[in-house]
Amino acid sequence: AQKITQTQPGMFVQEKEAVTLDCTYDTSDPSYGLFWYKQPSSGEMIFLIYQGSYDQQNATEGRYSLNFQKARKSANLVISASQLGDSAMYFCAMSENAGGTSYGKLTFGQGTILTVHP
Amino acid sequence: ETGVTQTPRHLVMGMTNKKSLKCEQHLGHNAMYWYKQSAKKPLELMFVYNFKEQTENNSVPSRFSPECPNSSHLFLHLHTLQPEDSALYLCASSQRTTYSTDTQYFGPGTRLTVL
């Protein structure tokens, strides 16, 4: 089974509107971290937001917020007031200890291409 | 220089060549990573170094040879590659690998083409 699933290959949104990018994850580890990254066409992966499995509140960073529903194992990214510069590939990723001593292994989903229309 | 830098940004090599990719982080981190991003595939972790020691080798073929001389520098030595090795190679660093909060910060990548 895939550890990170992003079911939306592509999404379109009008400038200034909000958009939600879906992410579901699979782990039996009680301690894990969830991340969202943005990858523009230039290739660089840009860190956007982090949510820890024990965090009680949803993470927010400026226009980005993470809708964390632990029981459903979902960690959707919400981008408010979309801008043209938000057009990029977005990746959901998870780090888990998996009974070991290292959180170094980051597992990525397939990504969602977001296109913002003027 | 700030963040994570990678050189070269683009590389074209023949199957018999030997080349090296360089990564440098200016964040004071202790862990560094190599990832491979092929078309239509998720990012694949290749190697992890924590305090200069390799802690993860994700079954990477021996034609890829990593080197981490110190916590700020990471190299990927390439030899006798195959066309299917053409991909974007991304380097990342994090403070450490101890906690789930250890966010990885990425460089701009090296786009490799093997002819």
Image: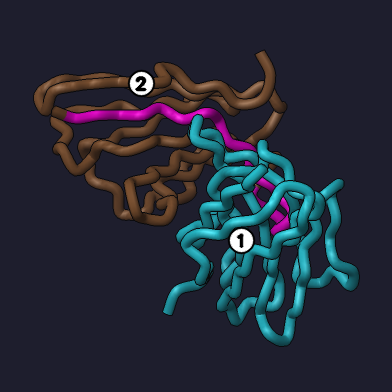
Chain colours: A cyan, B brown
Q: Nearer the viewer, mark 2 or mark 1?
A: 2
Task: Tell which of B113 and A55 is nearer to you.
Answer: B113
Q: Which stretch appears magenta?
A: B97-114
Q: Chain under label 2?
A: B
Badge 2: residue crowd in 10 Å (few <14, some 14–19, many ≥20): few
Badge 1: residue crowd in 10 Å (few <14, some 14–19, many ≥20): many
> Is A112 in the magenta?
no
B99 to A28, vertically: above or below? above
Amino acid type for the residue under numbered disc 2: His
Residue bearing mark 2: B10
Figure label count: 2
In which image quadrant can residue A106 be found?
A: bottom right
Name the spot of residue B34 as percent of width and height, x first: 45, 39
Instruction: Classify residue B74 as left or right of residue B112.
Output: right
Q: Residue at x 42, y 20 (%)?
A: B9
Q: Residue at x 69, y 47 (%)?
A: B103
Q: Residue at x 60, y 74 (%)?
A: A24
Residue bearing mark 1: A95
Q: Chain under label 1?
A: A
Residue A27 visible: yes
B66 to A87, vertically: above or below? above
- Respond whether the residues carrying marks 2 and 1 are from the same subunit: no
Name the spot of residue A15 as percent of width and height, x first: 72, 47
Name the spot of residue A65 as percent of width and height, x first: 80, 58
Q: Secondary structure at mark 2?
A: strand
Disc on res. B47: none
Outermost residue on the left side: it is B16
Quadrant including the N terminus of chain B = top right
Most frequent secondary structure within the magenta stretch: loop
Quadrant including the C terminus of chain B = top left
Q: Secondary structure at mark 1?
A: strand
